[in-house]
Image (cartoon, grey):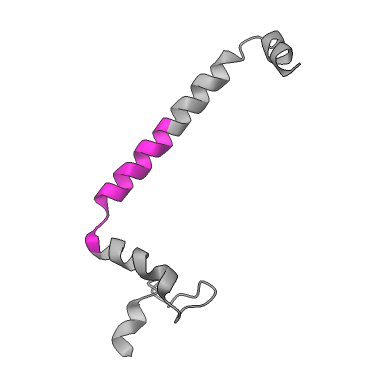
Amino acid sequence: MIKSVLQSISGVEIYSIVSLILFITAFVLVMIWVIRLEKQDIRRYSLLPLDDSLSGGETTVSGDPFSNRAEE
């Protein structure tokens, strides 16, 4: 039934092409972002699940959740 419904829609093949292009674009942008990350940021992100000092996504005024470490 689904096959016959999709075949009856004219121009339905464009949706698969557009969705593939959107996926590839998003994937490439995320890969570029990951490659450009500094090692310090990667280490900070990797420690986030293990950090118990911040509960509920609280951050400091500067927006950096690890900026209060120097005060401790």
Q: Is residue 67 magenta?
A: no
Residue at screen point 47% across, 26% down: 20
Residue at screen point 29% across, 85% down: 70
Asked if residue 48 lies left or right of residue 38, the reply is right
Q: Is residue 55 above or below residue 49?
A: below
Q: Is residue 12 above or below residue 41?
A: above
Q: Is residue 31 above or below residue 39?
A: above
Residue in front for this viewpoint, 65 or 20:
20
User: Quadrant where the N terminus lies?
Assistant: top right
User: Quadrant where the C terminus lies?
Assistant: bottom left
Q: Give how far across and how far down residue 41 sits, in percent.
A: 29, 63
Count of all numbered marks drawn on residues in the image: 0
Residue in front for this viewpoint, 5 or 22:
5
Q: Quadrant of residue 51?
A: bottom left
Q: Give how far across and how far down residue 40 sits, in percent.
A: 25, 65
Residue at screen point 29% across, 65% down: 43
Start and end of the magenta stretch?
24-39
Find the residue positioned furthest to the right: 1
Residue at screen point 57% across, 14% down: 13
Q: Is residue 37 magenta?
A: yes
